Image (tube, coloured by chain):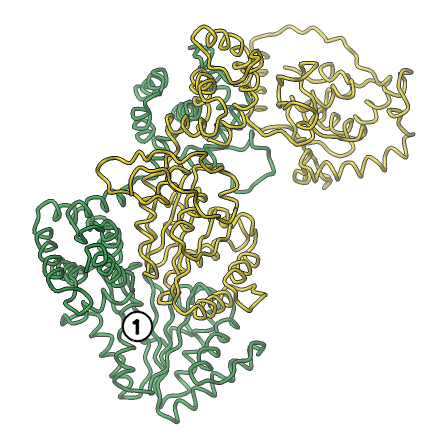
Amino acid sequence: MGKQPKTPEPERRTTRSTASISPAPTPSKPSAPPKTPELSSSLRYLLSGLPGRKSQILDLIRLIGPLNCPSLPLLLYGNASTGKTSTVLKVLKHLDRSFVYVNCRSCHNPRILFETVLSQLGSSHKKCKKMPDFLNYLREALVERNKEMVFLVFDSIESVRSWDNGSKVLSLLLTLYDQLQNYGAGLLYISQSTPDAYLLRFGSFQPIDLCFPDYTFEEIHSILMRNRANPKLYSSFLSVVLKPFTRVTRRLDELVSALDPLYKKYCEPLTDSTITPDEAMKRRLFDYVQPHLIAALNQTFTIPPRALKDKGGIKRQGSGIGNATGLPELDFHMSVSAKYLLISAFLASRNPATLDASLFDSTGGCDGRKRKRKSSQSSIDKKNTKAEEMLTKGPGTFPLERLLAIFQCITSVLEEEPSLNEEKSLENGIGLMSDVLLQLSTLCNSNFLCKSGNCPLEGSVRYRSMIDEDMALKVARSVNFPLSNYVYRR
Amino acid sequence: MAGSEQASVALVQLRERLCSRTFAHSLLQSSSDSNFRKLKFHISSSISSACSKVLLLRGDKGSGKAAVVELVLKDLQADHPNAISVVKLYGLLHSDDDNSALEEIARQLCSGHEFSFCKTASLEENKEFLMDMLKEYGLARKTVVFVLDEFHLFTQGKQWLLYTLFDAMETFTSQSIIIVGLSCLEGSEQQLEKRVRSRFSSCTLLFGPPSEEDGRRLLEQLLHLQKDSSLPSKYVVEFNSRLDKIFGDKKFKEILSSFTCADGSINHLLRFLFVASSYMDMETGYLSLQSFESAYSLMKRQPKFDSLHDLSILELYFLVCMHRLQCKEETSYNFNSVMKEYKAIQDAYRTSDNYSHAVCLRQAFEHLLESELISFTDAKGRNDSIRFRPVKLLVSSRELHDSLKSNPSCPAILQKLLDHESYM
């Protein structure tokens, strides 16, 4: 083994892990420290595919051990997108061991979990609902394999805690080692929570913990630099952009989704995207991108829904870079009556009930005049405490009648305006009512409204609006409703 | 044999020993007052005198209860061939409803005698089957041993299974039915109902960590390679002598004592040795002090400290704000109040880390919830949105302080904010 260019690796099955990380374009020169012995070429390939994870990979290989040799259970833990799943899968493939992989987040109840494991082992039992049955069938399936060792990989076990009967299932999974002694099964658990969360559930053998720390700044830099068409340009981009972004978050998936559109912006003034920038050009590009940088830092780093992406260019939530009007828009479609219902719910939650009469007078319009009041010290204090209360308690509840009353007031204003087009004209009162009740249940199901407890005096149901002011403003803007006139401000 | 070949054979041998539940405990069985001997005595005496007994084994997790039971039963089955039948039940699986326990008993008895097991039998049928089998056992002068793991789970609820078994013990007086209960909790027999306890006359065996001398002997016997034919004897001798040298080293003794200080049970030791053996130098095939040191540092991690170390600056701001709110003795605070505090700090000090509401919620707050450094105080409670539910900090001020110090890019302002509170 020397530093020769190595031959391309044999074709490996694309799974989730290999599909997500593209292979290294050229065989990289091994940068192994002089102390360790020569690493085999496949190991070097593995290490270069998972940067920053060298010590974890070597530990994992060491702990899994030689072929068909028994092993204690292992628990790998770390934050999201730190490479736990991909490391495990790649190492197991590199060592060429047979394994069964099941993700507890996609198998969202015990039956699916059990049946997935059994079907991957090739068991003849297709249905398995109860835990004792699962254990018996598992043992049968392992016995049929003739002592050839198989690894059971349970991913995202912290999500099992939130299942019904989840704590029992979790205890079963974590004590499988005791039950499966001498059956030739190795156990690997992957979790986002630290081992402290499971301390009470282990059986007689506590698993060996392997920590996957977050990537350091340099590792993030090297990961982002992989597979770039123009490395020098991208590294100059990263040198100005990466530091401020890592002050907000260190998670790789969020950084990637935040930096991609910004990089497109950075490259805009360049006519030739393959040139190497010199100092003067770097400074100019930096000046160009800086205002967008500040804006980008104040948006959430989310991946926008596909509908917006297809509209050409990537739009962002919040004050987007590519947005024409410069104001936030609603990302999804709602019917007009649902929008009005939502606005009424927001107003009902936000305003105290005593104000309704003055805000929505008999003509249906807003009064507009605000009564002048002497603001004494006590009233200022009262206002402050009320504001505090609102911060802590959240939006208020309202009965259904109040919601419908506000809704009728708002929509009756619309009917008076002659400049409405056909789509916006609403039916008469009775037809409106039945439509409204259907919309109400839809809004409840999508968590825009929620049912609060019953009123103790009357026994009627009370509702509460769950949207915040930004969202309400977006909805109001989409129907040209002057929301700010109606919102009670202290 | 080449060096690496020897190494892998040796490694396989060591791992097989360390992963087996019973091997380590079998090494301890010869001492005079060991639990192994006591248990064997109890069971064999009740077999020979054909009387029923209930035994309770109590000890921490990993102290070897199930291992010792397995060893004792294996020994007795060798001594009295075909006279003992064993049924194993686990509290986790079989204490839920009565039928699952009886079904499992029926299944194990059937497989022991090669009857065909019917899965759809009802509760009554299973119970009848059990009684018939016990009668047959009595006539044939055979013993049944019921091993109930996680005994304390069987004592919850209506204790129907225990009542049935104890009842059977009373009815069939001329044969021996032995129940061995394994539990890691104290006082499980106190939880038995009166009618069950009236039939419960048991003796208890306690399992504790091995003595220091036993532990040292165990260490040698676990790691020394045996002189058998698969490995060259020169290698075996060299391996064992190197190990002895390590065991005599002062640093090794320090590592071992600090390790067993936390948890002296055998299984904990086995984990440590397992990790140490994985650090075996595969070229030469010998263990060195370095292997034990690396194993110790691998097992010594502090997960909470690591997750605090990994936080971004914004998340640290959040934790410091929550800490300040806590120091101000606010009884409950939620995301909005923390944001208010955060904005107040930004207004006062005008740092460069002023981020919008949405970013703080998504990036910082939800990350902190996911990594379990903060959590909601109401248990699934109202359906409130995430901004209004009360939260609490799960990190102590000492830990927060240490993490701020260890974070290289932490702004000085955070340290100042945290320090000022400790003077208040």
**Chain identifier of the residue bearing label 1 in the image:** B
The three-letter amino acid code for the residue at tag 1 is Glu
Q: Nearer the viewer, residue A274 or A106?
A: A274
Q: Nearer the viewer, residue A459 or A429?
A: A429
In this rendering, the answer to whether B272 lies above or below A218 is: below
In this rendering, the answer to whether B424 lies above or below A374 is: below
Q: Residue at x 64, y 5 (%)?
A: A374
Residue A229: give x, y in percent of width and height. Answer: 50, 25
The quadrant in which residue B152 appears is bottom left
Q: Nearer the viewer, residue A449 or B157?
A: A449
On the question of residue B91 being in view, the answer is: yes
Q: Residue furthest bottom?
A: B139
The quadrant in which residue B191 appears is bottom left
Q: Residue at x 50, y 65 (%)?
A: A134
On the question of residue A402 being in view, the answer is: no
Element under label 1? helix
Residue B90: give x, y in percent of width and height. Answer: 41, 67
Seen in the image, is B306 located left or right of residue B265? right
Q: Quadrant of the C terminus of chain A?
A: top right
In this rendering, the answer to whether B255 lies above or below B39 is: above
* Chain that appears green: B
In this rendering, the answer to whether A52 lies above or below B414 is: below
Residue A212: give x, y in percent of width and height. Answer: 37, 39
Name chain A's colour. Answer: yellow
The quadrant in which residue B109 appears is bottom left
According to the picture, the residue beneath numbered tag 1 turns out to be B70
